[in-house]
Amino acid sequence: MDELLTTLHGATTRIYTSCTADSSAIPGRNDTPRTISACGKAVTVLLARQASLTLTLHARLATLAPRHGPTTDPPVDEALLRRRLADLLALANAKFLAFRFEVLPPCWRELYTSVRILTFHLGVLRSRLRLAGARDAESSAEMDELVRGLDMALIVAGGGSAWGRSAVNSLVGLLERAWEGDSARSADDDHGHGECRAAKRLKYTRDGEDSPPPPWDDSPLFSDEPAFEPPVTCPAPRLDGLSMDSFQAYIDPATNPHGVVPAVFTDLISDWPALNEHPWSRPSYLLSRTFGGRRYVPVEIGRSYVDEDWGQKLIPFSAFLSSYIDPSISSPNDGRPSPKLPSQPEAKKGYLAQHDLFSQVPTLRNDVLLPDYLWTSPPLHPSPEQNKPKVGAPQLNAWFGPAGTITPLHTDSMHNLLCQVVGRKYVRLYPPECTPAMLPRGTENGVDMGNTSRVDLGVAEGWDEGGGDEGSEIGAEELERFRAAEHWDCVLGPGDTLYIPIGWWHYVRSLSVSFSVSFWWN
């Protein structure tokens, strides 16, 4: 707890400094947020005032020992402090609604993150007595709320800045340590919640010395009960043993004048910890890496993102597992209360889809390794006007859900390595020259949906009954042209990696509980 309080004091001091001085002029503080002043003087002054008051409270409350004698510190109206923080949070939320995320001025993300850190600081100061070893329902609920606030900073605002992301990740890790106690950490717990370190191998077999196996070693696996499996009619090639040079030749337009086709690589990720010593196939392991399932995640609710009844919500990871994956799953049996979970799975599908889970939860990032193929030079988009600026690093996303989750037929603006870690998936792909037959959507509710097909492939093939998208009526001739289009398909199992070339249309369907990682690069 002392380390958490010390780190919080440093973070709040840094927020105060960013509001009251030119951080570029402060020696050794080049990682201090520098853009908060762009929110305007009134906002900056108000935030600085709340940071100052939080530091005053910290000086009074951070020690568990009683204070003796009179104090000359000015009184702090804590209720007013919380209201002002709520006002600043509401202002940042209003800006999120007024701008698309990619054009939102960075200062509002930093403001949002700063307010979440200050609110967390107040919560820790007030609850520290109960959190120091208590395991009752009240303290567990307080802990859930503390974790939620930090996760909101990461999910909603991306942590605001590199400093903000690092600070929030560190605070989550220190909070978990304070709650669990060092003795509860498993022997192979090599993770850090701040900057990611390279993934390590098993400690209980390292250097030939035996240690007790980790607690998840003999725990149950996710169910592999199969759902309906579409037939593979035009299988994509399955390859192994390709070096970087061989893969470069495979995707090089000079050696493929008619264009590259998708391929499944069967040996690209066989050394991932997620497939070996840190098994994502075991719910208990994933719960252990998400603060006992307390970490909040964004979940898509509904069959497909083009359906009328599709939506999203933020829920604890343990609630996602029990509500949408397996109702028998709950937090690890460590004697503490866990979030209330439903006894029956939800009727609708829940999908943790296209989420940068690994920035939010660095402990899981350590379980995946960047495939060597990401350092090759892939071809440009077949339509030059759709080329995007080169990204500095591959973009990682998580895809986790039950059998039957669907990503509708769509195309991406970058090359994709789709790595299958848990379960099985069916994928169908169409080349860019088939775009007219894919019947791309237009602008819907102000959003360009041109990368998504109007065709519900499951319905068109007779695998599913009617979709929930009422505005996508397709004529008989259009459907006939679609069915005649050339395509490739495959089923991915654990350890498989599908290369999806840029511009290719693809439909993805989970055949069981499935956890995948995608790497987008150009």
Image (spheres, rainbow, N blue to C red):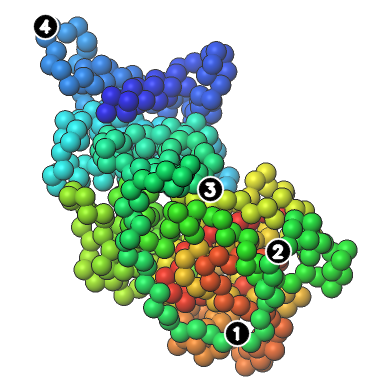
Above or below 310: residue 334: above
User: Which element type, helix, strand or loop, lies under badge 1?
Assistant: loop
* Of pointers 1 and 3, the one earlier in the residue sequence: 3
- The disc placed on residue 316 is none
Q: Which mark is residue 69?
A: 4
Q: Nearest the camera: 15 or 167?
A: 167
CA distance for labels 3 and 4: 51 Å
In the rendering, at what x and y percent does residue 468 appear?
A: 44, 79
Q: Secondary structure at mark 2?
A: loop
Which residue type does callout 3 highlight? Phe
- The percent coordinates of residue 326 (x first, y second) are 31, 69
Mark found first going from the N terminus, 3 or 4: 4
Counting labels gives: 4
User: In the rendering, which numbered label is found on residue 101?
Assistant: 3
The residue beneath circle 1 is 232
Residue density around tag 2, few if under 14, some if 14–19, many if 20 or more, within 10 Å: few
Label 2 vs label 4, nearer the camera: 2
User: In this rendering, which labeled residue sits more in front, label 1 or label 2?
Assistant: 2
Amino acid on which disc 2 is placed: Gly
The answer to whether residue 152 is seen in the rendering is: no
Percent position (x, y) of residue 107? Answer: 51, 34
The answer to whether the residues at label 3 and label 2 have Cβ atoms under 8 Å apart is no
Label 1, label 4: how far apart the Cα atoms are: 79 Å
The residue indicated by pointer 2 is: 241
Instruction: Compute the Cα span from label 1 to label 3.
Output: 39 Å
Q: Which image quadrant for residue 56?
A: top left
Disc 3 + disc 4, Cβ < 8 Å? no
Pick the quarter of the image with the C terminus.
bottom right
